[in-house]
Image (cartoon, rainbow, N blue to C red):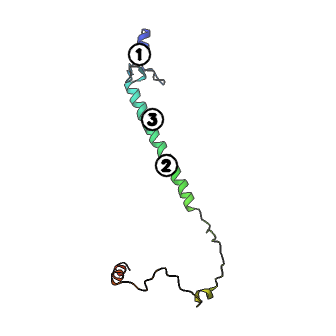
Amino acid sequence: MSPATIDMQCKYSYKECTNLRTYKRDGDLHRLCEYHRNKANALQKVYATKRRQEMRALKRAEMEKKMSQAREPVAKPEIKVEYDLACLLDDDFEPLEVYTDVDGLSDEEYAYLSTFF
């Protein structure tokens, strides 16, 4: 065989393959022939799928472990405040200062406010 023919031959490593190497999209040569490329791609696809499943199972197991661990209840701080309720019942309230001369509402004002309250 001529060196050019050997250079075009499939570079499959486990045994000699006399098939011609395939071309890449950019025009360069792949290392393998069509048959061995398809075989390698199929094996790679199976391996990648298996690896993804293993990683998902590992993440799922970690999440289940975290979720199953008993969580200690968080102690709420107890704040004791004493109120002087006597100030609420104090009769010494003074009325609010009114800054208007009008002692009552007109009929229109009363009707307007009654629609909202």
Q: Residue at x 49, y 42 (%)?
A: 51
Q: On the picture, is 81 further left or further right than 35?
A: right
Q: What amino acid does circle 3 point to?
A: Gln
Crowd rating for badge 3 (residues with CA inside 10 Å; few <14, some 14–19, many 20+): few
Q: Which mark is residue 44?
A: 3
Per the image, label 1 sits on a secondary structure element best described as helix
Q: Which mark is residue 64?
A: none
Q: Are marks 2 and 1 in contact (CB under 8 Å)?
A: no
Q: Position of residue 10 (x, y in %)?
A: 42, 20
Q: Residue at x 59, y 62 (%)?
A: 69
- Give 11 or 66, whichever is nearer the viewer: 66
Q: Earlier in the sequence, mark 1 or mark 3?
A: 1
Rendered position, 85 above or below 8: below
Q: Position of residue 15 (x, y in %)?
A: 46, 23
Measured Cα–Cα span from mark 2 to mark 3 = 18 Å
Per the image, label 2 sits on a secondary structure element best described as helix
Q: On the picture, is 115 further left or further right than 100?
A: left
Q: Earlier in the sequence, mark 2 or mark 1?
A: 1
Q: What amino acid does circle 2 point to?
A: Arg
Which residue is the site of mark 2? 56
